[in-house]
Image (spheres, grey):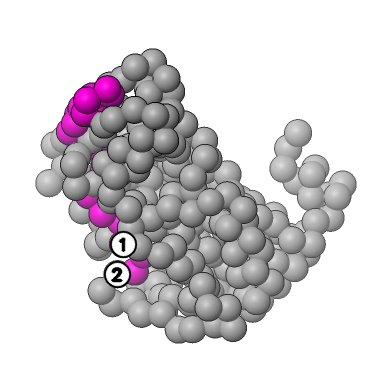
Amino acid sequence: MRWWVTFSNFSPQVVFHAAAYKHVPMIEDFPEEAVRVNILGTKILGELSQQYGVKKFIFISTDKVVNPTSVMGASKRVAEMVITSLNHQQTTQFLAVRFGNVLGSRGSVIPIFQEQIKKGGPVTITHPEMKRYFMTIPEAVLLVLQAGAMGNGGEVFVLDMGEPVKIYDVACELIRLSGLEPEKDIPIVFTGMRPGEKLFEEVLTAEEGVEPTAHPKIFKARIKDPLPQDILFRKIEDLKDFAQLQDASAIVRTLQEIIPTYKPNRGIRYCEVS
């Protein structure tokens, strides 16, 4: 079914936009898919929401948009910029909610580790110092709903996820919960960082700050989008053309033009990018 048919038939008042390609290594190999889904999909859905009178549009973002080293993070940052740009037209309230990893979601390390433990190991971790923020599914859903309710349009909300946790510590705890001993009963193997990955994900850039809200675990980021809408949308059209050509290097260069803080942790298909 075409998207406009859904809007026409059901006239939604609120849209929660969570659809995205989120797996960093995969998108490093296929950056054109990040353009099609994460950027163009967000723009199309946002414009349809305006056209059909949606009252509020909540975009699910990620901590990987901050000083991105991956195409995935950069594409989601561009999608944030699209959302805040569309909000200036004042027909639909657009806002974004930025947070980290959700325990038990598709692709989460928890079920992967559990399956590895069940098979007798090894448990594979990319780096001993790798850290991530984690939230449970119920906590993430509740905070997104609350942020969406309090938003007036144009905000990028940042959820308080507590302290980051070492992935190694998570693996050890899961092994112990299975009645086994890490390194003794179940070996832990470090496989090396993958393209696009960072040891630690931030939630704000050095230039950004946060303002408190009525909720103690929800903050509003002070965001300044550097590009006017006409320039941003022109760059997105360029990205669309490069995606059709499957020109990974041109996609990365254009993302760097849009997001000066994007420093690629180089993947295989565009290793020549300087």
Query: What is the C-alpha distance between the residues marked 1 and 2?
Result: 7 Å
Measuring from the top left, give residue 205's x and y in whole percent. 29, 69
Which residue is located at x 27 percent, y 60 percent? 67
The kind of residue tagged 1 is Glu
Which residue is located at x 27 percent, y 22 percent? 185
Residue assigned mark 1: 202
Mark sitting on residue 37: none
Q: Give the range drawn in magenta.
A: 183-204
Q: Is mark 1 on a helix, strand or loop?
A: loop
Measuring from the top left, give residue 261's x and y in whole percent. 24, 62
Q: Are there few (<14), some (14-19), or many (20+) residues within 10 Å of tag 1? A: some
The answer to whether one can see residue 166 in this image is yes
Horizontal arrangement in the rendering, residue 187 relative to residue 142 (left or right): left
Horizontal arrangement in the rendering, residue 70 relative to residue 77 (left or right): left
Mark sitting on residue 205: 2
Measuring from the top left, give residue 178's x and y in whole percent. 42, 29
Q: Is mark 2 on a helix, strand or loop?
A: loop
